[in-house]
Amino acid sequence: MFLVVIVAAYRNQLLHEHRRASTQINELLQASLENAMLKRDLPGLRSIVQDVGRQRDVATVMIVDPVGEVRFSSDPALLGRRFDDLRGVQAAPFVVPPAGAVFARDARGVEVLRTINPVHNQARCAGCHGTPATRPINGILVVDYLAGGVRRAALRSAFMLAASGAVVLLATLLAVGTAFYLLVLRPVRRLAAVTSGIAAGDLTARVRPHGDDELALLGRNFDAMIDRVSGTIDRLTDGEAFLQSVIDAVPDGVRVISDDFTVLKINRAYCVQHGITSDAAVGNRCYAVSHGRSEPCLPTLVSCPLVELAKPGQSLLKCQHRHVKPDGQELFVEVSASRAELTVDGRQRFCVIESIRDLADQARLSHEQRLSEIGQLAAGVAHEIHNPLSSIQLALAAVREKVTPQMPGRSGIDPYLDIVDREINRCIDVTGRLLRLSEPGGNNATLVDIGDVIRDVLSLVGCQATQGAVRIHQEIEGPLRSLGSDSDFGILILNLVQNALHAMPAGGELTIRAHEQQGSISIAVADTGIGISAEDLQRIFWPFWSKRADGTRGAGLGLAICKSTVEQLGGRIEVQSTPGQGSCFTIVVPALSPPRSTQ
């Protein structure tokens, strides 16, 4: 718009200068013509008109009389014509046009710059034209200049001016744009790129600006802010890792639950207990993770820590739960829960921290402690009984040597000495069996002859079976070898045999069958007792659950320990029972057959 205004103003100024120049030329021409007219030099007057008419850029030169008739003209065709007709004006009478220069069209329709100069009457012209008062105008000098050249020159100059202005404007815009890009856009784009990287999780991205302007100051402040945020995040990450390491060191399972039943955190022991990964538990609902439910547990059936600890005055809770692993196995646990107010997602929320102890592990630890005590007792028995028996056996041998065949009554003494020697060996053998069964099982497995273990156990419970009117049958086929410990297999068989004896309070038959088949050793303990109901079959392996046929109350750990021990040995335990007819417990463990000799 600025260029349009400047070009229009320049064009008008240029045309104005052309008008002024043409008017000055006309005035000079008028002076020459007046001089010729005063001298009555008509040929000279025509010659001047013709000479001027042949000038470059001059279209026509005319002298019009006061009544509007063309008297002199550089174009002979115009002589005698009315000037009004030439300029397309219908006026009667003729009106002298004002002096000046205007753009018009001549008789041929060509655009011209027409200059009009009235020739005023003077006193010296009164002889021919009369007094100035009666005839003020002697004639009109009209010069038509070709307007095309004038307009082209004006437009050419205007366009040159416009082009120069456009070049200057473009250069200015380019300079301003370059400066704006270097000083504003590029720093802003760099800041935007770093912001996008940080939003995507790349906390190492930095602006690192150059210069001292406001954007550089903004970039440095932004980098400093990200450094502080990154340091805070690192401290939070380190603190979270430290907290996770602390709770991972706890041997019991630990989990933190928010008030909407969402699991916020668990430890490594919890993952091992329940056979799940941290990703599968954290963020999931607690009842889905530990109970396999799609909705919260019923508070009337299960002691829910979230429900109980939400009550006023409740801060601690201990209860027992039955959890379900992803593979469907049941896990009986003791839950110790405490109330806590924690900041979650920026706000204080009611949470529960649970410490979960596997009751099977607790039973195993209790059993191991019991075995340790029995082992200490057996060691004392070895010192207090085994050694004196050995001394008695040595003394008996010395007596045999002192008593010669020639001594009177020797034949009557020998049978009694044999009985004493046999009973001493029996006592030493029983003591040895007790020591073997009471040895604590370790992680270092050894080769165990299961047939020998079965015979040792049956020798220990023989008296109890006789008192309960129970007949024992054993069917052991061939050598049965497996990896483990004598104490582990001994406790397995001892618990099953004692449970069978308790199931036959009125007497019966106990059958133990053991054989190897397809790389596994199967040990079956069957009784003819009262059997187990279908409802109780679901609970017999629960820790601390006990229901004996003889009415006594047991610890409820025997079968739970059996199941845990069999699983540690890489085997399985199965049970079949018919109420009123008896039960059969079957243990299947991997066999370790001796290598065959090759020739």
Image: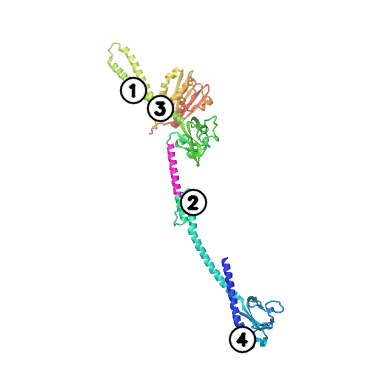
Q: Is residue 149 visible?
A: no
Q: Earlier in the sequence, mark 4 or mark 2?
A: 4
Q: Earlier in the sequence, mark 1 or mark 3?
A: 3
Q: Are marks 1 and 2 in contact (CB under 8 Å)?
A: no
Residue 578 is covered by the magenta coloring? no
Three-letter amino acid code at disc 4?
A: Asn
**Distance in Å between CA atoms under marks 2 and 3:** 62 Å
Badge 4, how many Cα within 10 Å: few under 14, some, many 20+?
some
Q: Nearer the viewer, mark 1 or mark 3?
A: 3
Q: Which residue is mark 2?
A: 195
Three-letter amino acid code at disc 1?
A: His
Q: Which residue is mark 3?
A: 369
Q: Which residue is mark 1?
A: 383
Q: Nearer the viewer, residue 147 or 465?
A: 147
Badge 2, how many Cα within 10 Å: few under 14, some, many 20+?
some
Q: Earlier in the sequence, mark 1 or mark 4?
A: 4
Whether 360 is drawn above or below 530: the answer is: below
Q: Looking at this rendering, what residue extends furthest in the top direction?
A: 408
| Residue 381 in the figure: left or right of residue 151 | left
Q: Determine the secondary structure under disc 4.
A: helix
Three-letter amino acid code at disc 3?
A: Gln
Q: Position of residue 346 (x, y in %)?
A: 50, 42
Q: Is residue 537 visible?
A: yes
Magenta-tinted stretch: 225-248
Q: Which residue is mark 4?
A: 35
**Distance in Å between CA atoms under marks 1 and 3:** 21 Å
Checking the image for residue 147, the label placed there is: none
Q: Position of residue 9 (x, y in %)?
A: 58, 70
